[in-house]
Structures are given as structure tokens and as C-alpha cells.
Image (cartoon, coloured by chain):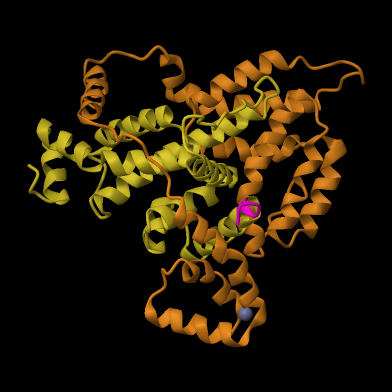
Amino acid sequence: MRDIDDRELLALCRDDHPEAFNELVRRYQERIYRVLLRLVGDRDDALDLAQDVFFRAWKGIRDFRGDAQVFTWLYRIAMNLGLNHIRKRKLRSALPLHTLQNEEPAHPENPQHEIERDEIRELIERAVEKLPAKQRAVFILRYYDDMPYEQIASILNTSVGGLKANYFHAVQKLRNSLHHAL
Amino acid sequence: MRCKSIRYDLADYASGRLGPERRKTVEEHLAVCPACRDILREISPVFRILHEHPPIDGPMPGAEFVVRVRERIDTQNAGRRAPTALLANPLVRFVAPLAIAGILLYVFLVPRTPDAEVSPALDHALIGSLFEHMDTAQIDRVHEELPLVIPAAHADAWESALADAKTVADIDTLLPLFNDLSPGELIAAGSVYVNAEDLYDLVEAGDVPPLDASPR
Ligand SMILES: [Zn+2]
């Protein structure tokens, strides 16, 4: 099962071969979880969303025509769910009942330089979180996943020209958010 | 060589992701264009700091991950209905976006005396729970409806500022318009903000749609 390619695996999944779908999950669970973690910034949420991605993939597997790569298809589901999640969260945070929680990044047991590294990491995370949802998605796929624009365009269902603009603006905004640390 | 066609490649240039040919084109332009050199100088440190501080992902999902996905599939196969069966109903899901738009229209458009306060509690709970059960397309649809409910006092300012907006920074300056809104109004402002994200792209493309802020 480990040796067969995605296309054959998909055919087996469609035939309700139970072990085939398990293999599909195992093959992509890390990549899907990781991109969701970058997008939503919370491990528990990312894990829930990742499970949702595969559950929806299972439900939609007969409708997937196989003209895209399997992982492009899974990424598309993941980005839809992830963007949806952060948009809902943003709407909720606009409600006055929800106040922002104070986060305490300090780790007193760590040596000094490790604290500084962690603080900068935290700064970067927050700067990425502050990006508008679509720019954040483009930035994560382009920078952290090192994906070609054509593939991002297929995942986010948009144009390459618009994506390049999104990416450029995302980097400019990161620069403004991080300028104290630069 | 137009700067704009080069500019959107500068981030990839700074992070070493351009192919050799494109890289050469960019370098030739940089040699003669101080403006693009300035932009490159500004954004390069971002990639340095990102490179020096890669994120720590922590533990990856393990063998139990596929087991939990399987459990969900088996639950579905057993034909059990989720407790949110009402909201899973296609008709309810179709109506939910309209219901939210209706609530917001009510909040803003029903005439009321100046000191009558709309109680936000009910609206928050209802809107919050409805959003929980909507997919991206439905949420987008609500956002499309929401410019309708910008309070009249802000509509003119929003419209004229938007008409003048030419850059991303111009749109950012619109957002403080919502700083002094009431709780009910903030719900709409939050959504307008989400909507504004898409406006970034449209303004960048020189294609800002007319925003109808008056009730239909
Ligand atoms: Zn130039």
C-alpha cells in the first residue's frame, strides 16, 4: 500500500478499500496539519480542522475527478476550512463580549538567548496572524510551503497576478509589523 | 522596463526563489532603478529574520490521527445525526445568511428614538451560532449583504473615502471609521473589515466596485 502512487490509491479509495483511505490520510496528515497550524495558529484547532479535511475528503472522494493532484485537492479543502475558521474567529472577536486574552510568552527556565529567539518567533507569529486572511494564506503557501504560484492559484481558485500582489503586500505588512525586530 | 512588473518579484528575489533568467532581468532593472532598490532594501531583512527563526511545529499528528478520522466516518456511516441536525438542513442553511442580513438590517434600519438601545445580547448569540454552521460561500454571501447596513452616519464617509482609495494604505485608513460604533454596529463593522480584505485586491487591480450603502 505504501508503494502505490496517489492515483492508484484514489481508485482503491473509490472502491471502498478501507486500508487505502487510511494510507491516504497517513500520507498527507502532516502536511495538512502543518499548513493549518500556520494558518490558524492553534494546535488543537489545527488538529480538529485537519480531521475535518480528511472527513470531507472521504465524503467527496467520488466527486473528485482526479484532474488535479491529490494533494492540491486536499489543500483546497484545508484552505477553505482554515480561512473559514479564521474569518469566523475575526467576526467573533469584533463582538465586545470577547476581550483579547493576554498571552504570556516568557519561559523562565530557558537561557537568555533562547528567550529572545522565542520572543522573535512569537513576534513573527503575531505579525503573520495580523495579515488579512487571504494574504496570510498566500504567504503561508508561498513562503513556508514553497509552492509555485500556479499551484497556489489552483488551490485558492484565483489568478497568479493577484497572488503575486497579495504576496508582495503581505511581505510589506510583515516588514511594518516587525520593524522593531529588524 | 515597468517597475510594477519587477516589484512583485522582489520578494521572491530577496528569498532566493527566482529562476536564473528572471533573476537576471530583476538584477538588470535594480541596477538602473533606485526606487526598486529601496523596496528591496526594505523587505530583505524580513526574509533574513524569517529564515533565522523558523517556526517550531511541535509534535505532528501520530498514528491515532487516522483512527479519529475513521471514527467520524463510522459515525456518519451508522447514520447517526449530529445534534445540530437543524442547521445541517439545506433549507435552514440557505436561509441562515438571509436571516443574519435581516437581523442586521433590523438593527440599523428600523426607526427608533435616539436613546433607545438595541440589546446586543440576543443578536450576538444568534449571529454567532448561525455563523458556526455556515460554509465559506455562505459567509461570503453575508459579507456581500453587509455593506447595506453601514450606518447612515458613516455611509458617506465610507463611500467617499473608498472612491478616493488608490492604494492598500488608503483602505487601511477607512477602518478607523468604525472605532466609535455601538456593540450592535461593531458586528457589522467586523464583517465590513473582512470584506475590506477583498477590496485590497480590487483596488490594486484598479477595479473598485460601487458600494451601495443605502437600503434597497
Ligand atoms: Zn523600478
On the image, which quarter does residue A26 sit in? top left
Q: Is residue A39 above or below residue A160?
A: above
Q: Is residue B63 above or below residue A170?
A: above
Left or right placement of residue A7 versus residue A173 in this view: left
On the image, which quarter does residue B118 sit in? top right
Q: Is residue B119 above or below residue A157?
A: above
Quadrant (top left, top right, bottom left, bottom right) of the C terminus of chain B: top right
Rendered shade, chain A: yellow
Q: Which residues are magenta?
A: A178-182
The chain drawn orange is chain what?
B
Q: Tell me residue A34's x, y (percent).
A: 36, 41
Left or right placement of residue B17 versus residue B107 in this view: left
Q: Can residue A156 be seen by looking at this rendering?
A: yes
Q: Nearer the viewer, residue A97 or A124?
A: A124
Q: Nearer the viewer, residue B178 or A43?
A: A43
Left or right placement of residue B206 versus residue A104 in this view: right
Left or right placement of residue A171 versus residue A155 in this view: right
Tell me the residue at 52%/87% (across/down).
B28
Tell me the residue at 32%/30% (across/down).
A51
Q: Tell me residue B163's x, y (percent).
A: 78, 57
Asked if the magenta segment contains residue A181, the reply would be: yes
Quadrant for ligand 1?
A: bottom right
Helix, strand or loop: magenta stretch: loop
Quadrant (top left, top right, bottom left, bottom right) of the N terminus of chain B: bottom right
Q: Tell me residue B25's x, y (percent).
A: 48, 84
Q: Tell me residue B149's x, y (percent).
A: 74, 34
Asked if the magenta segment contains residue B62, the reply would be: no
Q: Nearer the viewer, residue A151 or B88?
A: A151
Q: Residue furthest right?
A: B114
